[in-house]
Image (cartoon, grey):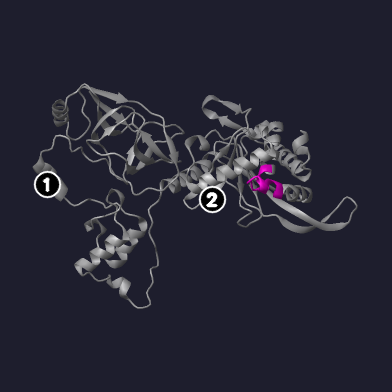
Amino acid sequence: MRHVFKFPDIGEGLEEGTIVEWYVKKGQEVESGQSLVQVETDKVTTDIPSPKTGTIAALYGKEGETINVGDPLAEIEIEGVEGEEAVEEAKKEPAGPSEEGVEEEEGAGVVGTIEVAGDGGHLPSSEEGMDATQKSTEEEKPRKKALATPVARALAKDLGVDINEIKGTGPGGRVMKEDIHNYVDKQGKQPSKASQKEGQEQTVEYEDLTQIRKTIAKNMVQSKHNAAHMTVMDEVEISELVRVRGKYKEKYKDQGLKLNYLPFILKATALALKKHRQLNAEMDMDNGRMIYKKYYNIGIAVDTEKGLVVPVIKNVDKLSISELAEKTNEIAQKARDGELTMDDMKDGTFTITSYGSIGGQFAVPVINYPQAGILGIGRILKKPVVNDKDEIVPGQILPLSLSVDHRIVDGGEVSRFLNTIIEYLGEPVNLIMD
């Protein structure tokens, strides 16, 4: 029997993905659960496992091409159908998956990591049912669009060569910079006139949008379009928090943990959310109701080389400072190493973005829609402050910027929520007393 395996709906509203790398080829035997292909989705790059044990009869889509949920990925020949019968079935529908003796797969579980894939495209026709002459003719046809990195495309353009004429030696036939230089040397081509003009520099550089960058753009527009943004800014004096953190930093370091201020801010935010449920909610316009969440999963915006990602720390209110330190270190490292899974990215109820380590005091953070709010953390500054004795003393000031969906949260509640966070951070002992 021939099994048609379709690109599964893996949740979180994903509609398409880009094929990064095929792990198998036509005619190869595979086991159930074995990874077939790596596909970059809007949120993670995902290894798609085989749902069946059998032999790969056909593959659909090339590396770098875009595939939609529900489109066929592979045909797997399962025990019970002889090879000649399978070929006859394929000849009936050479341009796509066979329909007779076919079992269709509706979905499958996945795991994933964050990486960057290539360009978009369309699914090619299957080679099933073609004779040798047909295949030879197809192979002689030039590719419509070469698979290559933006850097390679820019180099080809600078040298005045058509990258689609170059045979790639990289993974999946990807055109590498070395391929372009070798092609130029072999053909004896000279750089384009534009690149030869003395003193003239490239005024623009083109780079294909990655799936991650497309998703960031889509989410930002969606948030601005659907939520009524309002931002409130304030400062909190955290000299006591600085002292506590300094006291325990070396102890945590001996345990292999880096203790920064984020665990304290996470804990303070979770406790404040428990007291101000409107900030831990979302608006369900379709059913005319509010959804108040009684769990506190806080997303952390992480700046990586491949773009901004927001992994989620679950049940923050139930974790100690040491546990939060461990979780934040772990999740940040996974983000930088490109090892986040889909489970790391979902079910967030509120978000924190910390830009202070890079620079900047205040900001207007964009809400991670459909959440009700996002808290921005600025750079800690040493400033003169007035203490309880009306004395001017050095102080440690932490800037806070809170953006909310004004449809959900009124201004008074925004201020009360921010004041609660300020109380916890100003007197960190309250983090373990409440």
> Distance of mark 2 from mark 1, alpha carbons?
48 Å
Residue 341 in sight in this render = yes
Residue 253 among magenta residues: yes
- Discs 2, 1 touching: Cβ within 8 Å: no
From the top left corner, tell me how far across and down residue 94 is, in percent: 17, 34
Sequence-first tag of 2 and 1 = 1
From the top left corner, tell me how far across and down residue 374 is, in percent: 61, 42
Q: Residue at x 44, y 31 (%)?
A: 11
- Give above or below for 87 relative to 163: above
- Give above or below for 301 relative to 69: below
Q: Nearer the viewer, residue 56 or 343?
A: 56
Relative to 107, is 253 on the left or the right?
A: right
Q: Residue at x 31, y 54 (%)?
A: 148
The quarter of the image holding the C terminus is: top right
Q: Kindly state the secondary structure of the residue where label 1 is placed.
A: helix
Relative to 347, is 104 on the left or the right?
A: left
Query: How would you rate the neighbour count of disc 2 (Cα within 10 Å): few for under 14, some for 14-19, many for 20 or more?
Result: some
Q: Residue at x 27, y 51 (%)?
A: 173
Q: Residue beneath label 1, please?
A: 137
- Residue type at mark 1 is Thr
- Residue type at mark 2 is Asp
In terms of image quadrants, where is residue 179? bottom left
Q: Which of the labelled discs sits on residue 303, or is there none?
A: 2
Q: Residues in magenta?
A: 249-263
